[in-house]
Image: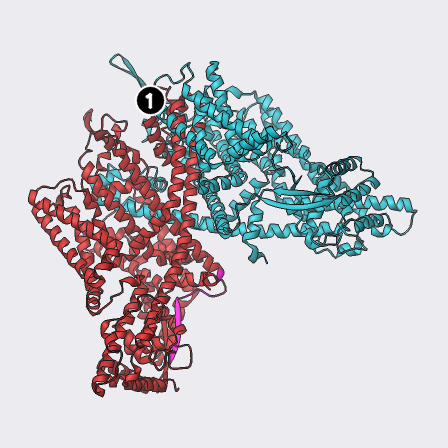
Chain colours: A cyan, B red
Amino acid sequence: MDDDVPLILTLDDSGSSTSAPLDDLDREELPNENGGSYDVINDASSPAAGDCSAQQSSARHNWEMNYQEAAIYLQEGENNDKFFTHPKDAKALAAYLFAHNHLFYLMELSTALLLLLLSLCEAPAVPMLRLGIFVHATLELFALIVVVFELSMKMRWLGFQTFIRHKRTMVKTCVLFVQFVEAIVVLVRQTSHVRITRALRCIFLVDCRYCGAVRRNLRQIFQSLPPFIDILLLLLFFMVIFAILGFYLFSPNHSDPYFNTLENSLVNLFVLLTTSNFPDVMMPSYARNPWSCVFFIVYLSIELYFIMNLLLAVVFDTFNDIEKRKFKSLLLHKRTAIQHAYRLLVTKQRPSGISFKHFEGLLRFYKPRMGARERYLTFKALNQSNTPLVSLKDFYNFYEVVGLKWKAKRNREHWFDDLPRTAFLIFKGINILVKSHVFQYTMYTVVAVNGIWILVETFMLQGGNFFSRNVPWSYIVFLTIYGVELLLKTTGLGPVEYLSSGWNLFDFSVTLFAFLGLMALAFNMEPFYFIVVLRPLQLLRLFKLKKRYRNVLDTMFELFPRMASLGLTLLIFYYCFAIVGMEFFAGVVYPNCCNTSTVADAYRWVNHTVGNKTVVEEGYYYLNNFDNILNSFVTLFELTVVNDWYIIMEGVTSQTTHWSRLYFMIFYIVTMVVMTIIVAFILDAFVFRMNYTRKNQDSEEDNGIVLEKEISKEEVVGIIELYKRSSAAAETAQLQKMVLQMDKYGQTSTLFLGRRSRTKSDLSMKMYEEEIQ
Amino acid sequence: MDDDVPLILTLDDSGSSTSAPLDDLDREELPNENGGSYDVINDASSPAAGDCSAQQSSARHNWEMNYQEAAIYLQEGENNDKFFTHPKDAKALAAYLFAHNHLFYLMELSTALLLLLLSLCEAPAVPMLRLGIFVHATLELFALIVVVFELSMKMRWLGFQTFIRHKRTMVKTCVLFVQFVEAIVVLVRQTSHVRITRALRCIFLVDCRYCGAVRRNLRQIFQSLPPFIDILLLLLFFMVIFAILGFYLFSPNHSDPYFNTLENSLVNLFVLLTTSNFPDVMMPSYARNPWSCVFFIVYLSIELYFIMNLLLAVVFDTFNDIEKRKFKSLLLHKRTAIQHAYRLLVTKQRPSGISFKHFEGLLRFYKPRMGARERYLTFKALNQSNTPLVSLKDFYNFYEVVGLKWKAKRNREHWFDDLPRTAFLIFKGINILVKSHVFQYTMYTVVAVNGIWILVETFMLQGGNFFSRNVPWSYIVFLTIYGVELLLKTTGLGPVEYLSSGWNLFDFSVTLFAFLGLMALAFNMEPFYFIVVLRPLQLLRLFKLKKRYRNVLDTMFELFPRMASLGLTLLIFYYCFAIVGMEFFAGVVYPNCCNTSTVADAYRWVNHTVGNKTVVEEGYYYLNNFDNILNSFVTLFELTVVNDWYIIMEGVTSQTTHWSRLYFMIFYIVTMVVMTIIVAFILDAFVFRMNYTRKNQDSEEDNGIVLEKEISKEEVVGIIELYKRSSAAAETAQLQKMVLQMDKYGQTSTLFLGRRSRTKSDLSMKMYEEEIQ
């Protein structure tokens, strides 16, 4: 292969001054308005005089700076950072680098978490975690100072002008200032005042680098708001009309407490929208006149079954549209980033492409952990032409290719191929066995029998002492079978292959848990009994059987990161509401409170004696309070589930003012928004996935993206030369080991497989193919 | 224009034997296997001998038969009737014609309704409608005999072979037989036995010609079932796992009645899926250990928020797919029907197209009510070429064009153009006024002020006597304003144009109602007071303001027929469950029943004296019973809304057996299916519509399909000639009137506008354009 010859030539070139980066003039032609680079580079970009070695070292220095800037551009492209926040000079660059590494990100995250967790210990604290005011206020001040430090680094990097223009940062600064003042006030007064502003603490979390997904979710939620609000108004409008009608129709009935005033009428129709008080709200009027049910049926049909679904339709549609537009703009942003990086990496003489040397330099900054072999493989994977340069068109695939994990393609099929004949045959036999359908279906049968066994066993137990001291024999039998299966599979497939499948991993951990449970039972370790309870989870293995379930579970795993970020977004809303709730409603409900309200029963806690037996009448609802942040979260979850939420609302309202209802209603509407968007997201993701599967029915089940590249020995030797010149010892050593291995097996080339899992972006690319063109 | 010359030529031709329909040989080439026509035609298809006049009359007779068969084909295409039910001979044709007219359809429908309504009067009857056993059994027998007659007509038309092959008809026959036997048994024994089979009566309704949409819905529901059931199994599977876990975790807590047995554990988790018993089900364990809430949060997150939405996604996707495939197959079916009809209408000499004469003959059978002018306009609208024949390609648009309503395009812009100058100016002024934005926005302001007024007024009333004898002056003022608006608009636009807009019609009727309300108030007609209550409906007029609302309301009106048919489908399910419920649970719940159950409070009805006051404690739930079919429907609606449904279930269960729960659970799952499909339908329809609007943003708001065609005087004269020859007096008279009118205004031609509203099919056609090609 001749591929590596020009590579070395380029390397030779690079020493001369002419291969300096594009000069200012060229750089001016960048399509982006913010074409400026660091001053250092601009200063040195006209190498005219000076001795050769200084020139050479300066050129190398220039190149290093270029690599770094290109890497930054690519990072910005990946993270969807706008280019106007691109560091403009060397000082900014230093600050940028300081603020862009995992240590700094972790600091950001932990400060934000510390601030959020403080509410566990502040004023209405969780009993066990209560801290003195002095302690938690000091902790808060400390965390806030760290945030100040972070912000000052950001200011240094962005410059004052950009800092002011960057909205999110400005909001953060304002919140920081307020928090600072309040924390000092608390310290000085030695007492907590009503601090609803604590709800704003979540902005510190949202601004974290690691919470990018949450920010995206929030943006999407806000973008979906306008159509949502339109339909919401329609909903409220009908509610008002029906409230007036209901008031006119039912208030003459004095035994009907739901419609006696216009306010009650409105509130009860709002609750009826959530179906929480149905059919109770209908009963008094229904008892008087059966035809009054028509009012409620019409109301529910219009509001609940029609407009609420319309809401979902509108949000789903907007969501879909935003998702498509977002994908397009992200793609465009990435392309622009790649263009920026590309211009920094081509040489004056060869503006048509990037040589390996420069590409390698870029990767050193972009992915410092990447080995020399991987860098070369990435370069080869990008390079579609026969020339030794990567053209802009090839370079556009950068993000798709750089994520691949490279592995030498094994020429051994099984892990036991090198073993002696007898051992080989035994393992081969096991291998064939565990791969056979008979074995698989036998195991499914065992799992199914086990499932039925557990069910029957549990059914027979009925209130007996089920944590008996004796380990039931059935448990041992099934566990032995699973153990044997595990052993066979591990030996038959090899541990690495066995554990590379998610399903096997699941089997493994379930069996392990079951074994631990057995140990716990056998050795009487009471606190670990709960593991025994996890036995039914084995049954989940049955879902491998059907294709639709596999699809569903695969999609679920694919969606998991997005779902987690949506969950986190919901939690952030919860946090805000929990703080507000605690500030206003902490301690207002307690056993036997709310006697003036219609829901007094739910709060009753009576301990009276009937005959010679003590009967406890528990209403339990006093447990749904805002007494500390954990309780608040549980209460808010109950409000999210919506059933019987009016009991909680009425309880609190009866102890405070009518206006408390606003809190609960607003919470309902906010969770409705977030939940509708979550539903729209799940709908969108699954429908998308199913459409995708339908479109690609011919192609077999995909195992992610796979690429194959071959490297010859000469190529490796060529790269070693290259690295030797730049005296990179580690890289040279790695590559030389590779040459040795190739020599050992007498190969002239090695085949490598690049693999990564398919992301939503890949799918979108394929789905929107024609539209993007 | 020369267009009409060949037309008359064709007419001349038709007398000769050569213009007979395609002979057998040609007919054999039809793509459809069932190419046979009625024997009469086949017999007469070789006109070789006989005198000319007999020949001519026979040819005419043949043509008439051909027209009829073609019309039948087109009807079959429109109704999506399979061609294997096509009448095969003259006897079948007679039966077909007998069974295919609105009188027969109405008989079908009324018999089915009578059978369904009988359950109002049978055994657990609505008190007011109770009938003697002898009466209702006789009525039933009568209705069943009518059904037998209908079926025998169908058998005559289909022939025994096809009759047996037609599944729906066979099922109907079996049900009919069972019903017959049972009705006779009831008559003989003079007492009703447990007749669950009454639930099958709905099949008579479903089979009605007018209930085609319901049949389609049912088919769609059954087609969506397989994926639905898959996900449902997943749901139930997790439920079982959690039930076992819950039993292990919470049954040691003796104050927790929800998990004390595995059965309770399962039932309560099923109810929890509907959120109906949340947070109560959590409270006992939560009171003991706060961390037990994790179990419930995880359960609800997985089951309710994930799998239930997955269910919606899967159904939505399947629905979407079915909708698309259905549209395609319908289109194909229509095309085949058109091909069949086309072959019957072309002549041997001119196989390339249909002449007006034959087209007119077809329309006489296909749309007997259509006037001669409309027939010619339809022909002209179909004819895209300059030849006097409609080719097959043109004929494919038959269904789109035949639905158009034709109207002569007015050359007068306003209705008052012909009035004297002064009057014209006055009306013109009014016209400009009512069309101005100022006028419109003034009216919106008035409506808004009126709305606020009503709200404030209602708020001030608070329990007073609001049906006072005096008419409030505000009412009169606003009504006067609306009256003046109505008057101005009617005079300014002309009554016809005014009432042709749906919104104006709405305004008109609301104002009329308000006026009637005023009358009722003024003349003290108590029973009509409810009209006053409708006043807030005026506010709906405000929704004209925003485009999104207009879109939503338009879509709503477009969807209305489909929604109604879905509602009817739901009602049919309700009917089945109501019958079963009545047979098993009639009379089982009553005040103060269910004292052994956990929900006894809800059924309590105590009338006790505290001090000197009688306090009534009403649980009211005894009203949710199955005592007659109307009560059952209300109860089933409450079960559909799902909130607190377990109270109804537990009440009934405590009075009967555990197995009663199955009824309620199955009902929940069935309504879940239907409701999910309704949601999927609404989602699909709106998303479809919104996508459509987005795709056609350039084109202005559409007023349906509009076509313009011009007819010259010569053409009309030509057609008159044609009709005169076939001595059709009515048609000739209509056309001559048209000629007279043209003469009066001195026109040589008249422009006609064909209009119809856009249907889903038109939209689909545009959306799937590329896929269909």
Is label 1 in a helix, a strand or a loop? Answer: helix
Q: Residue lying farthest right? A: A51
Which amino acid type is marked by label 1?
Answer: Met
Q: Which one is in front, B514 or B62?
A: B62
- Give the residue pinned by disc 1: A460
- Residue displayed at 39% across by 23% down: B248
Q: Position of residue A89 (x, y in %)?
A: 76, 45
Q: Position of residue B418 (x, y in %)?
A: 33, 80
Q: Which residues are magenta?
A: B695-710
Quarter of the rendering containing residue B287: top left
Q: Position of residue B95 (x, y in %)?
A: 19, 65
Quarter of the rendering containing residue A457: top left
| Relative horizontal placement of residue B694, taking residue B144 as reference (left or right) | right
Residue B700 among those drawn in magenta: yes
Q: Which one is in front, B617 or A736?
A: A736
- Residue displayed at 31% across by 43% down: B670
Q: Which one is in front, B113 or B439?
A: B113
